[in-house]
């Protein structure tokens, strides 16, 4: 309990310092993601990208309130648990933090967005804003959308739109096998794949559409057998983590040598695990790109990231937009404490993303519209993943992807 | 038909791999009465050690050395951990091994981090041994079968043809006689635990390249191993073999064939509701056999335990 | 059911409600009522609520392990199912069902009871390994179902609700964390009292008898299976209460409320606290929640420390923290507790130093290996240093060596003092 | 003659190929003190286990007061008024002496699976338990853990638990095993005391105890009753002498 006292004291002290409006105001952002447990790599990588972006694009150039203020990331370990996330949210709010960032797991994101909505409804004078940097379940900006949630990553539908562009352009693909984890995101990927393929290439036959239990499959060989047996020309999967590695290795091990389209088939040890076998086969759809760097500025930005964090990868380019866009919103409002005004400022904001090209935070559903790329695993790229001698190289680039896509969001504004 | 054959082979590999774990676990349980919850953790240790060794010396040295190290660690755990807890009874022993499993997982993360490690099969075996209707069967899996069969035959030989084997067999059937063997019982226990864990370690080494080396690999396999020996019958080596193969095939075939509840229900004369996504029974209609695959062993275990608590081939109740 | 014992208590002979038996309860109540005045932040309240829920859950678990001798690897099932049903009822309240929020735990408890009744009908036939394995199987089964049966369990996102939609109770709508805290504390006290009283009923005592010697109990007219089954149902009820409290506090339930990790951690909680004592799980829950949430804020290695603590506990003090405290009852009764103060104080400093420095070694090693790339600066115990060199490591190792040496030097003295304090005649 | 308290009809029990009990017929009248003697391995404990439901017989029947209880579970048989003690001390080691006795009382005093009574507040149970404690001379040890008692005290407690429930048929399996002479005398007095007006079936090796206590004696050899009569008859029986001595000699030869 002593620790709690201490926390209260620090929170109080922080409040006092903020009140005194020192020359170097710290605007703190709570980073609530897994920093221990099986998904710690994801969280650590995300935190590093934030820290790098803040240093390079906001604090050092003095881009926040004319250099009067600085961003600071405060990490909170949610152990990828909804319950822990809610506790950490409370802790963060007690420390006076009103800007929350999270991204790993749509399940946690959905718990957080609900909790934030509830808090803001119960405390309308003291709202909290939730910046979602990588949870891509479409529901978050459709049925579950709410004013205080902003998504900076392209959602699963947008990514599938770009992914199917790539497939549509390849006349050799006649049969596609869709496989994913049995939960909301996997289902979203599967239904989007069906929808877009039907629309773009009605001649393509979906020879398999399958969901497997999440995190429970020890050996993907039987699935791989089915995929090979179906005669598919391409595989689409939303799998991540161990399920991605297991599926990829099994499919390639069963002799499959055609494209495997993935959402999360790179970095965090996955590229290294696939190794040479995955070159030319594993594709990844994602926002922005690192190879080739889209601009000299981006090149320098990525280089300095790898200098600072040689053991990590810049795996989520869209995360580099969060801090600059937030800074722009705060600059527009003129202070960092009027959260409601900041949220309004973020709505519809246009931004020149360092790795994602022209980026717009769509007003209707708070979904960022940006460049989405389909990348292929390639040996000898400039910025490699997992120090494995290979990385992802952009092949199909779609600017302002799905900018006119429909949304079911009925945003209620305070 | 071709796919069926491939699945038979794949299921066989899975089953044999499971058996390598189960045989050690059964041996330990039969002799010492300890259900080693941490058994899969020793499997994980085997894979991690082999990876680390393979970085220096290549795969083959790892295959030999890693199980030895795991065995020694196992023996030490028995000597300085289990033996200490033994006097408090079986439940604390079980709890001790449960804690050990947690500790091993955390320790591995401490040293090797949380990501998947790039541990792959040796280049010498990295080719397709044969292929059935376009489905490649990797040479490495042939090797896995060979190793597992080798282990099984060795075990069979030792148990049926050697003196120490006879003693162990006697102990399997009549645990109370262990005390009267006239051997140094604590030493026998230590060796059995060491050998059992070394076998788990070996299973880890050969499974690592196929199933992946990551901190969750023990948890993923842990409970299924218990389920297997419980189904087979605690203390029965043959039961462990039979149950391992049953589970190997059951899981492979459950994933291989897309039988859906919709097919079954339609065949039974029900009609699928139009608006399935809002229907209260949507889950029932959308259920598929591959979805159920991973829970089938647990279902089987509960059924076996309710109908035949001593397991399929067990002859004593715990 | 347990309500019955409560009414009996109040209606029963008043003279047996003595001052000494009600004092601890009154004190606990007063203490819990005052806590929010000390810890006012909502995160502190959330953590205290979390502790309260874990206490109820751990006590219900100990009805099985400590009092009934049943080792369960799937107790989260009953808490989780109770919670899920409570959450669904909470959502029905939002749609117009009349049920004041404070009564919700009864709903969850009844569903926990129902499932314990069904599953217990076959799992309690045997104790020991068979029971443990069935509990594991059922646990895995239900956890797996939770991802498949999306309508009920909400898939990976779980289901959520809003506690404030029910009819206000005395004007309270449970908007603030503080109001929720008092609701939780009310149920904590009630559930704890009921579980305590349960251990004093004929069935509670016979559960102990069955745990000690199931065969003998059979020859006294008791069916061991029925005794276990009833304990199991009661335990399921209180687990369901804990689940409902969880639903009220966090307004969300997910697969993690049901899975094996949760079942495993409650075993850990109960064992660390001490299974042989009624207060054991309470101590365990407080220590565990504290370590998990607070230690978790400061180090990534919290789970490793917890694992070490657990294994150490099983090996060296299997009766848990409560057992360590209870060991001092005899010296206290002999009036020789004071003999222990000095040696304890003497060893405290080196012992704490050695624990901290050993932890420091682990932290530095971990930081060297896995620290954010390029981030060589490390802050430990308020000291900031560069973790790349070996200075810090050597220093921590040296401190650890010296303090450990001191601890081992002092051990004989402690042992002597202990023997002395435990023997009535030794002083003479 | 009235219905016998215990009746065994052609009782048989085999373990695998070994026939341990081969067709035992026995009638024990109400209020009788009946002893079973026989050489080691004659099947005395097995017979007890068959009567009390610990094992199910291979064939034949067990009747209590004329009611067929064959194949019933121990607790069901206990509820019909039969209680037993064990050769190897079988108590609740982690509970106090007082609680041990109380456990023996609860079922028959009607508390059964009750969770609506506070046990400490049930005067009738407490008084009865104290009474039995006094009877077995363990009042002094009342609050000690049963597991910490001396051997003889544990044996006394075992008997205390057995008789606590007020069963009218008591089976005692070698109550005096491993006791000194003075301790044995105390136990025999105790047994005589507590089984007043009850049916007693006892297995014992100490012949002094047997002839002191029993109204009738049955001799069990290799799973068969070769004689069942009054002590005097048994003492004089040549058949018993032969079988008993023969068996003893064989035993020694092994």
Image (cartoon, coloured by chain):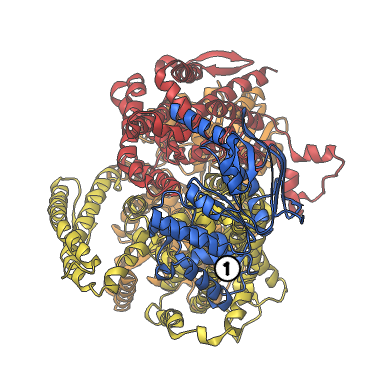
In the picture, which chain is blue? D
Can you say whether B47 is above or below D118 in the image? Answer: above
Q: Nearer the viewer, residue A177 or C30?
A: C30
Q: Colour of chain C?
A: yellow
Q: Nearer the viewer, residue A119 or A4?
A: A4
Q: Residue furthest right?
A: B269
Q: Residue at x 27, y 43 (%)?
A: C369
Secondary structure, mark 1, is helix
Residue C110 visible in image: yes
**Residue A345 placement, left or right of C155:** left
Q: Colour of chain B?
A: red
Can you say whether B287 is above or below A1 in the image? Answer: above
**Residue C181 placement, left or right of B270:** left
Q: Residue at x 55, y 20 (%)?
A: A255
Q: Nearer the viewer, residue A101 or C309?
A: C309
Residue B27 point in image, percent of width and height: 46, 30
Kindly identify which chain the residue marked by label 1 belongs to: C
Residue A109 visible in image: no
Please tell me in which quadrant of the rendered image residue D185 appears. bottom left
Please tell me in which quadrant of the rendered image residue D242 appears. top right
Which residue is identified by label 1? C202
**Residue C169 placement, left or right of A322:** right
Residue D162 point in image, percent of width and height: 55, 59
Q: Nearer the viewer, residue B191 or A347?
A: B191
Q: Colour of chain A?
A: orange
**The N terminus of chain C: image quadrant:** bottom right
Residue B214 point in image, percent of width and height: 42, 37
Q: Residues within 10 Å of mark 1 (few under 14, many from 20)?
A: many
**The C terminus of chain C: image quadrant:** bottom left
Residue B179 point in image, percent of width and height: 40, 34
Can you say whether A78 is above or below A209 in the image? Answer: below
């Amino acid at each position: 309990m002593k620790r709690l006292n201490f926390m209260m004291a620090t929170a109080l002290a922080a409040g006092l310092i903020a009140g005194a409006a020192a020359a170097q105001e710290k605007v703190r952002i709570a980073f609530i993601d897994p920093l221990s447990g099986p998904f710690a790599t994801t969280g650590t990588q995300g935190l590093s990208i934030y820290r790098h972006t803040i240093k390079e694009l906001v604090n050092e150039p003095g881009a926040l309130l004319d250099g009067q203020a600085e961003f600071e990331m405060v990490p909170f370990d949610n152990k990828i648990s909804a319950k822990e996330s809610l506790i950490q949210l409370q802790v963060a709010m007690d420390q006076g933090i009103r800007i929350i960032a999270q991204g790993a797991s749509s399940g946690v994101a959905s718990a957080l967005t609900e909790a934030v909505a509830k808090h803001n409804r119960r405390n309308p004078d003291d709202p909290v804003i939730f910046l979602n940097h990588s949870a891509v379940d479409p529901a978050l900006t459709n049925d579950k959308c709410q004013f205080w949630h902003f998504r900076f990553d392209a959602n699963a539908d947008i990514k599938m739109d770009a992914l199917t562009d790539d497939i549509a352009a390849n006349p050799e693909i006649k049969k596609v096998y869709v496989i994913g984890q049995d939960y909301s995101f996997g289902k979203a990927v599967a239904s989007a794949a069906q929808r877009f393929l039907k629309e773009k290439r009605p001649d393509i036959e979906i020879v398999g559409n399958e969901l497997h239990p999440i995190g429970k499959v020890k050996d993907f060989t039987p699935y791989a057998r089915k995929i090979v047996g179906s005669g598919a020309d391409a595989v689409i999967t939303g799998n991540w983590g161990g399920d991605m590695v297991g599926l990829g290795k099994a499919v390639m091990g069963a002799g499959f040598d055609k494209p495997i389209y993935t959402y999360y088939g790179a970095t965090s040890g996955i590229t290294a695990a696939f190794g040479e076998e995955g070159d030319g086969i594993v594709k990844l759809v994602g926002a922005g790109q690192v190879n080739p760097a889209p601009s000299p500025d981006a090149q320098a930005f990525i280089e300095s990231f790898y200098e600072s964090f040689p053991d990590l990868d810049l795996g989520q380019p869209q995360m580099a937009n969060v801090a600059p866009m937030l800074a722009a919103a705060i600059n527009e409002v003129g202070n960092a404490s009027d959260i409601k005004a900041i949220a309004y400022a973020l709505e519809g904001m246009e931004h020149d993303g360092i790795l994602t090209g022209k980026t717009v935070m769509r007003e209707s559903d708070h979904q960022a519209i940006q460049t989405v790329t389909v990348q292929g695993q390639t040996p000898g790229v400039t910025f490699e993943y997992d120090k494995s001698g290979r990385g992802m190289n952009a092949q199909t680039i779609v600017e302002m992807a799905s900018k006119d896509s429909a949304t079911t969001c009925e945003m209620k504004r305070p | 038909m071709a796919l069926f054959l491939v699945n038979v082979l794949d299921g066989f590999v899975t089953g044999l791999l499971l058996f390598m774990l189960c045989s050690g676990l059964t041996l330990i349980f039969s002799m010492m009465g300890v259900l080693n919850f941490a058994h899969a953790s020793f499997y994980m240790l085997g894979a991690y050690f082999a990876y680390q060794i393979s970085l220096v010396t290549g795969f083959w040295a790892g295959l030999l050395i890693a199980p030895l190290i795991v065995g020694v660690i196992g023996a030490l755990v028995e000597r300085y951990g289990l033996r200490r807890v033994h006097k408090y009874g079986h439940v604390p022993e079980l709890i001790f091994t449960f804690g050990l499993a947690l500790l091993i997982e955390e320790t591995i993360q401490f040293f090797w981090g949380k990501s998947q490690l790039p541990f792959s099969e040796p280049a010498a075996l990295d080719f397709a041994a044969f292929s059935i209707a376009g489905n490649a069967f990797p040479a490495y899996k042939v090797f896995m079968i060979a190793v597992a069969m080798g282990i099984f035959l060795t075990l069979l030989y030792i148990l049926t043809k050697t003196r120490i084997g006879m003693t162990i067999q006697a102990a399997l059937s009549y645990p109370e006689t262990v005390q009267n063997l006239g051997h140094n019982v604590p030493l026998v226990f230590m060796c059995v635990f060491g050998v059992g864990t070394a076998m788990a370690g070996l299973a880890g080494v050969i499974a690592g390249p196929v199933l992946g080396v990551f901190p969750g690999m023990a948890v993923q396999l842990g409970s299924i191993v218990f389920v297997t020996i419980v189904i087979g019958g605690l203390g029965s080596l043959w039961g462990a073999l039979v149950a391992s193969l049953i589970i190997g095939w059951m899981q492979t075939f459950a994933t291989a064939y897309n039988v859906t509840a919709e097919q079954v229900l339609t065949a039974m004369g029900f009609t699928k509701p139009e608006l399935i996504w809002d229907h209260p029974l949507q889950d029932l209609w959308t259920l598929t056999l591959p979805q159920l695959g991973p829970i089938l062993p647990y279902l089987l275990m509960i059924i076996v335990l309710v109908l035949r608590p001593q397991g399929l081939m067990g002859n004593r109740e715990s | 059911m347990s309500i019955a014992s409560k009414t009996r208590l109040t209606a029963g002979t008043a003279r047996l409600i003595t001052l000494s038996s009600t004092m601890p309860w009154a004190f606990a109540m007063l203490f819990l009522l005052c806590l929010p005045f000390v810890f006012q932040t909502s995160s502190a309240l959330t953590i205290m609520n979390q502790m309260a829920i874990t206490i109820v859950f751990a006590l219900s678990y100990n009805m099985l392990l400590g009092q009934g001798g049943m080792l369960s690897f799937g107790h989260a099932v009953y808490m989780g199912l109770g919670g899920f049903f409570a959450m669904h009822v909470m959502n029905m309240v939002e749609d117009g069902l009349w049920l004041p929020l404070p009564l919700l735990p009864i709903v969850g408890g009844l569903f926990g009871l129902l499932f314990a009744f069904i599953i217990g009908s076959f799992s309690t036939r045997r104790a020991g390994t068979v029971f443990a394995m069935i509990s594991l199987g059922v646990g895995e089964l239900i956890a797996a179902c939770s991802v498949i049966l999306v309508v009920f369990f909400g898939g990976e996102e779980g289901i959520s609700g809003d506690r404030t939609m029910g009819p206000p109770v005395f004007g309270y709508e449970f908007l603030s964390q503080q109001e929720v805290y008092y609701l939780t504390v009310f149920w904590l006290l009630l559930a704890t009292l009921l579980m305590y009283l349960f251990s004093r009923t004929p069935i509670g005592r016979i559960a102990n008898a069955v745990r000690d010697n199931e065969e003998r109990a059979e020859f006294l007219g008791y069916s061991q299976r029925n005794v276990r089954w009833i304990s199991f149902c009661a335990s399921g009820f209180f687990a369901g209460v804990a689940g409902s409290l969880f639903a009220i506090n966090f307004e969300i339930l997910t697969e993690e409320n049901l899975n094996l990790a949760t079942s495993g951690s409650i075993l850990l909680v109960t064992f660390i606290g001490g299974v042989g004592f009624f207060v054991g799980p309470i101590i365990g829950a407080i220590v565990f929640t504290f370590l998990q949430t607070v230690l978790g804020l400061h180090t990534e290695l919290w789970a490793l420390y917890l694992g070490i603590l657990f294994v150490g506990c099983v090996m060296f003090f299997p009766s848990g923290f409560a057992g360590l405290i209870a060991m001092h009852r005899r010296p206290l009764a002999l009036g020789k507790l004071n003999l222990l103060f000095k040696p304890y104080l003497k060893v405290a400093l080196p012992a704490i130093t050695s624990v901290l420095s050993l932890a420091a070694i682990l932290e530095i090693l971990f930081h060297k290996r896995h620290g954010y790339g390029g981030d060589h600066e490390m802050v430990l115990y308020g000291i900031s240093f560069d973790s790349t060199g070996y200075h810090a490591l050597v220093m921590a190792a040296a401190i650890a060596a010296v303090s450990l040496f001191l601890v081992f030097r002092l051990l004989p003295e402690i042992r002597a003092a202990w023997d002395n304090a435990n023997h009535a005649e030794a002083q003479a | 003659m009235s219905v016998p308290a215990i009746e065994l009809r052609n009782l048989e029990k085999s373990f695998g190929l070994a026939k341990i009990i081969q067709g035992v017929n026995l009638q024990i009248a109400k209020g009788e003190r009946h002893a079973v003697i026989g050489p080691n391995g004659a099947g005395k404990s097995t017979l007890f286990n068959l009567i009390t439901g610990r094992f199910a017989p291979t064939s034949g029947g067990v009747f209590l007061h004329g009611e067929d209880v064959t194949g019933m579970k121990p607790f069901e048989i206990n509820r019909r008024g039969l209680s037993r003690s064990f050769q190897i001390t079988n108590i609740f080691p982690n509970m106090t002496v007082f609680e041990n006795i109380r456990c023996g009382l609860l079922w028959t005093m009607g508390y059964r699976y009750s969770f609506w009574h506070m046990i400490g507040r049930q005067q009738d149970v407490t008084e009865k338990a104290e009474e039995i404690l006094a009877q077995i001379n363990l009042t002094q040890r009342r609050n000690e853990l049963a597991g910490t008692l001396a051997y003889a005290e544990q044996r006394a407690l075992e008997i205390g638990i057995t008789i606590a429930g007020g069963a009218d048929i008591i089976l005692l399996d070698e109550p005096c095993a491993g006791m000194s002479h003075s301790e044995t005398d105390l136990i025999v007095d105790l047994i005589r005391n507590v089984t007043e007006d009850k049916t007693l079936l006892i297995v014992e090796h100490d012949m002094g105890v047997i002839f002191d206590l029993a109204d009738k004696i049955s001799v069990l050899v290799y799973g068969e009753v070769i004689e069942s009569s009054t002590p005097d008859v048994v003492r004089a029986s040549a058949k018993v002498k032969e079988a008993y001595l023969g068996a003893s000699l064989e035993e020694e030869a092994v």
